[in-house]
């Protein structure tokens, strides 16, 4: 099973609640594969795009086994799929991504231990299990700092930014829910990402560095082709390569970094699957993130990645759609992608657009001139 190559006509299984799935399903079908989607919602776009949808939750082992046994290989398109579910599916089919990297990325303590083991720079942190731990650890970490649960599945729930001693008392509302990480708050000037694709032989292909912006703690804009200092780019490529080489993983993954004013680089997070920052490569590069991921899963040779043109990806919101009608009939360099969620799903992010030009700054000026969006912030609360 471990050495199987996927050929046209073979079946790829896709699991996970994410818009990533529909683009991957489309790519897989273009490459000749059949697609089966496992999802809790029969109206999910990935299910609609797939040749077959199996509807069930992560606890239904009978349906999970049936799903796995129908597939030549399975891929997860969200880092929210529990690692134990992937471990269960591995008993019945091939999962090139594996579960090791997923286990590391889903637990903040495991992620930090992994990065420390390979000598990667991370923010100072401490393990917290009680309110007393917070008071004691703040004295060594300093202000400002932030407390987060070790389980990333909680998102921004049970997080608290601590800028002064009186903020610590607010942690009492959630500190009994489990184990937490207290870490120094990094005052960064840029957040940068690298999408790396790794095949089963360990070969790596890196996409160009992406600069990301956030609005209300959610990814809003990703830009590629902008000016990044040569020494910064070299160091980020080196760090991303080291991380990817040391992970047991096959496929596309995102590694995010904080860059400070004085040029220090910290790893923010590892996401071992296709990630929305990679949507920008649909137009920016000669090969998309989705195709490169499929090539790795299928044991095909990875393509060389070339930047074609500076591109900015902007996430769309339902509140933007009316204002976009004017741009729809004016902009020749804007390209749209809609997820086609059913109306009952009430999704606030219906898709994204890709704007291209000769210069990232000029593209951003064009976007800003439309007055469709507010200026994004550069922090996501992490």
Image (spheres, grey):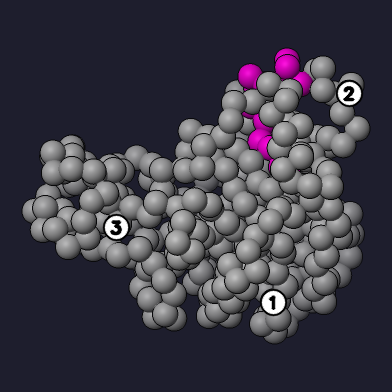
* Left or right: 190, with 28 as reference point: left
Q: Check disc 1 and report its element: helix, strand or loop.
A: strand
In whole angstroms, how far apart are the C-alphas of marks 1 and 3?
Answer: 31 Å
Q: Residue at x 17, y 47 (%)?
A: 176
Pointers 2 and 3 in contact (C-beta within 8 Å): no
Question: In this orientation, does residue 27 appear?
Answer: no
Q: Which residues are magenta?
A: 312-324
Between tags 1 and 3, which lies in front?
Answer: 3
Between tags 1 and 2, which lies in front?
Answer: 2
Which residue position holds label 3? 183
Q: Which mark is residue 330?
A: 2
Question: In this orientation, does residue 148 appear?
Answer: yes
Task: Decide which of 365, 163 is in the foreground and name it.
Answer: 365
Lower sequence index among marks 1 and 2 = 1
Which residue position holds label 1? 204
Q: Is residue 314 magenta?
A: yes
Q: Residue at x 87, y 28 (%)?
A: 331
């Amino acid at each position: 099973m471990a050495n199987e190559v996927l050929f046209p006509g073979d079946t790829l299984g896709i699991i996970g609640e994410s818009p990533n799935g529909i683009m991957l399903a489309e790519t897989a079908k273009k490459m000749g594969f059949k697609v089966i989607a496992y999802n809790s919602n029969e109206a999910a776009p990935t299910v609609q795009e797939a040749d077959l949808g199996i509807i069930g939750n992560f606890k239904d082992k009978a349906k999970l086994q049936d799903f796995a046994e129908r597939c030549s290989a399975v891929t997860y398109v969200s880092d929210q799929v529990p690692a134990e579910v992937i471990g269960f599916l591995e008993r019945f089919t091939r999962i090139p991504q594996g579960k090791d990297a997923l286990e590391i990325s889903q637990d903040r303590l495991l992620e930090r231990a992994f990065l420390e083991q390979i000598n990667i720079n991370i923010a100072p942190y401490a393990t917290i299990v009680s309110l007393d731990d917070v008071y004691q650890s703040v004295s060594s970490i300093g202000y400002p700092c932030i407390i987060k649960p070790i389980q990333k599945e909680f998102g921004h729930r049970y997080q608290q930014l601590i800028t002064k001693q009186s903020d610590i008392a607010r942690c009492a509302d959630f500190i009994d829910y489990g184990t937490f990480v207290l870490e120094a708050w990094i005052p960064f000037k840029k957040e940068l990402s690298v999408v790396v694709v790794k095949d089963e032989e360990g070969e790596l292909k890196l996409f160009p560095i992406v600069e990301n912006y956030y609005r209300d703690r959610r990814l809003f804009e990703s830009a590629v082709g902008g000016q990044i200092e040569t020494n910064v780019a070299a160091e980020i490529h080196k760090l991303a390569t080291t991380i990817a080489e040391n992970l047991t993983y096959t496929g596309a993954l995102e590694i995010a970094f904080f860059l400070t004013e004085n040029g220090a680089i910290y790893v923010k997070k590892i996401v071992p699957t296709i990630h929305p920052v990679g949507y920008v490569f649909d137009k920016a590069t000669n090969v998309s993130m989705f195709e490169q991921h499929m090539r790795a899963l299928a044991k095909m040779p990875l393509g060389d990645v070339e930047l074609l043109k500076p591109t900015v990806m902007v996430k769309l919101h339902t509140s933007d759609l009316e204002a976009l009608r004017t741009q729809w009939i004016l902009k020749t360099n804007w390209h749209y992608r809609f997820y086609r969620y059913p109306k009952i799903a009430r999704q606030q992010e219906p898709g994204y657009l890709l704007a291209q030009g000769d210069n990232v700054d000029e593209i951003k000026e064009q976007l800003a001139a439309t007055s469709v969006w507010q200026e994004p912030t550069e922090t996501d609360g992490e």
